[in-house]
Image: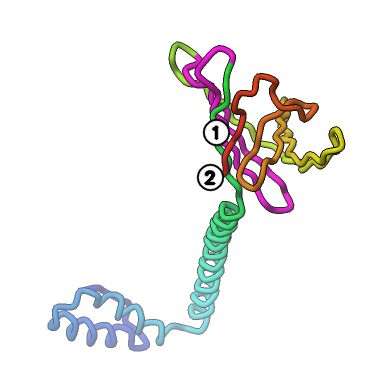
């Protein structure tokens, strides 16, 4: 049986609850004693307990706000994924079976872009992959009396150019917006 300081009734209250709960087989008798012991504390001790309780409540509130921010970040990321266009395709390579491009374009005010460039079987039969992150710029130019709509993907060390062919195709071109003279397929299809 727990021993509590006798005085102002706390020993009696705990004794009653201990005996009753022990007979019922309840193992939470100590919690009940401490719960009812609060009723008999001096005003100074009550004030200390209130301040401690307020401190822990404030900590719990701040921790719950941080968890909410994390879930909000996940919701924002989920919404960003929903507002992203994906293009994918394999274009010819000079010294291998091809280069696979995977492009994710954000459809918001940031115009962010993420691109994965994979040279197929480049190094001893293994693929070589490079990741790019940057900004996309929509370009509209007149070339030979024809309006050309395209995207300039601006990465830190390199730029890529694509002409839009309908709603579902991007065609890789050079920096002068000219298609390859070889006539080979340089198209990336929307997923």
* Magenta stretch bounds: 94-122
User: What residue did someone put label 2 on?
Assistant: 191
Horizontal side, residue 134 vs residue 6: left or right: right
State which quadrant residue 153 falls in.
Answer: top right
Quarter holding the N terminus is bottom left
Residue 49: x and y in percent read 49, 75
Q: CA distance from mark 1 to mark 2?
A: 10 Å
Q: Is residue 84 magenta?
A: no
Horizontal side, residue 21 vs residue 5: left or right: left
Per the image, label 1 sits on a secondary structure element best described as: strand
Residue at image x 87%, y 37%? 145
Of 34 and 10, the residue lying toward us: 34
Judge whether 61 appears above or below 97 on screen.
below
User: What residue did someone put label 1 on?
Assistant: 89
Residue 181: x and y in percent read 70, 20
Q: Is residue 120 magenta?
A: yes
Residue 130: x and y in percent read 58, 26
Of 48 and 28, the residue lying toward us: 28
State which quadrant residue 92 falls in.
Answer: top right
Judge whether 111 appears above or below 118 on screen.
below
Task: Say how many tags the image has.
Answer: 2
Of 88 and 142, the residue lying toward us: 142
Residue at image x 62%, y 41%? 169
């Amino acid at each position: 049986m727990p021993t509590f300081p006798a005085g102002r009734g706390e020993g009696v209250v705990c004794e009653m609850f201990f005996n009753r709960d022990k007979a019922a087989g309840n193992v939470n008798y100590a919690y009940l004693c401490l719960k009812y012991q609060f009723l008999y504390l001096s005003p100074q001790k009550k004030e200390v307990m209130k301040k401690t309780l307020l401190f822990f409540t404030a900590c719990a509130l701040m921790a719950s706000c941080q968890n909410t921010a994390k879930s909000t970040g996940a919701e924002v990321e989920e919404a960003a994924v929903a507002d992203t266009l994906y293009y994918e395709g394999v274009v010819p390579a000079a010294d291998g079976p091809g280069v696979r491009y995977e492009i994710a374009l954000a459809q918001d005010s940031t115009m962010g872009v993420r691109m994965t460039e994979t040279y197929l079987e480049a190094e001893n039969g293994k693929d070589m992959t490079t990741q790019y992150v940057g900004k996309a710029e929509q370009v509209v130019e007149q070339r030979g009396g024809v309006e050309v709509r395209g995207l300039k993907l601006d990465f830190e060390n390199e730029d890529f150019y694509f002409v839009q062919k309908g709603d579902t195709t991007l065609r890789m071109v050079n920096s002068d917006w000219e298609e390859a003279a070889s006539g080979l397929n340089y198209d990336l299809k929307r997923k």
